[in-house]
Amino acid sequence: ATTKRTVEEEGTGVLYNGYKENILYAFPADALKFGIYEKLLGGRSKKSIPPLEGAVLGAVSTALAQAMTTPLDVVRNRVMVEQKGSERGGGGDEGDGERGGEGRGQGRSLAERGYFETIGDIAREEGIATLFAGTSPRIGKAVLSGFVQFGTYELTKGSMASFFQGRK
């Protein structure tokens, strides 16, 4: 009912608020995560890594990547909750310490201003710490998801290698 009412009032485009920002956030976050993981493996990525070691290194790499990309996530979240026609943009009650801010961007929406301008506005008007709002819960989630993702990856990689070696 809420989705239907929102689409009727604001159009289907509202369902895609923040889509571009989501992509712009996800690409660097994933690139960092996998890059850090490869670096922590020390060139052993082609070899069989014990799943537990992969899980621990994956948890560390995912946590570091999430911490480094928190400012992108802050902007992404604000764009996604920004209300159409809002003068000041989103933010406010996401529960991660973010606040909206009057006067930023001369009346343009957050999505119109883009990442770098919005990050600069937030840093200037609300302080650098605001760009890292919600870092602790993001790291907590990242540790769990990285542990499962990379542990499963290494387990599957080892199983597939054994399977194909047995077929030779």
Image (tube, rainbow, N blue to C red):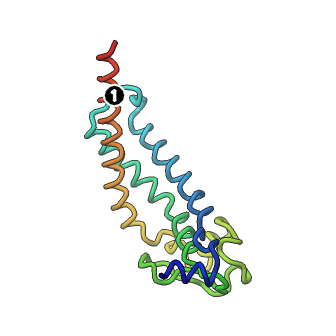
Q: Classify the position of the C terminus by image quarter.
A: top left
Residue receiving disc 1: 160
Q: Secondary structure at mark 1?
A: helix
Instruction: Return the x and y of residue 78 as percentages of the image width and height.
Output: 55, 74
Residue nearer the viewer, 154 or 104: 154
Question: Residue visible at 27% across and 33% down?
Answer: 50
Instruction: Return the x and y of residue 128 as percentages of the image width and height.
Output: 54, 72
Residue nearer the viewer, 28 or 6: 6
Question: Residue visible at 56% across and 61% down?
Answer: 22
Quadrant in the rendering for residue 115: bottom right
Instruction: Return the x and y of residue 53 as percentages of the image width and height.
Output: 28, 39
Question: Residue visible at 31% across and 55% down?
Answer: 144
Q: Is residue 29 above or below residue 14?
A: above
Single out the residue that lies furthest toward the top.
Answer: 168
Residue nearer the viewer, 49 or 160: 160
Quadrant in the rendering for residue 101: bottom right
Q: In the drawing, does residue 17 fall left or right of residue 137?
A: right
Disc 1 marks a residue whose amino acid type is Met
Instruction: Return the x and y of residue 44 as percentages of the image width and height.
Output: 39, 29
Q: Residues within 10 Å of mark 1 (few under 14, many from 20)?
A: few
Quadrant in the rendering for residue 139: bottom left
Q: In the drawing, does residue 147 fall left or right of residue 89?
A: left
Q: Is residue 48 above or below residue 165?
A: below
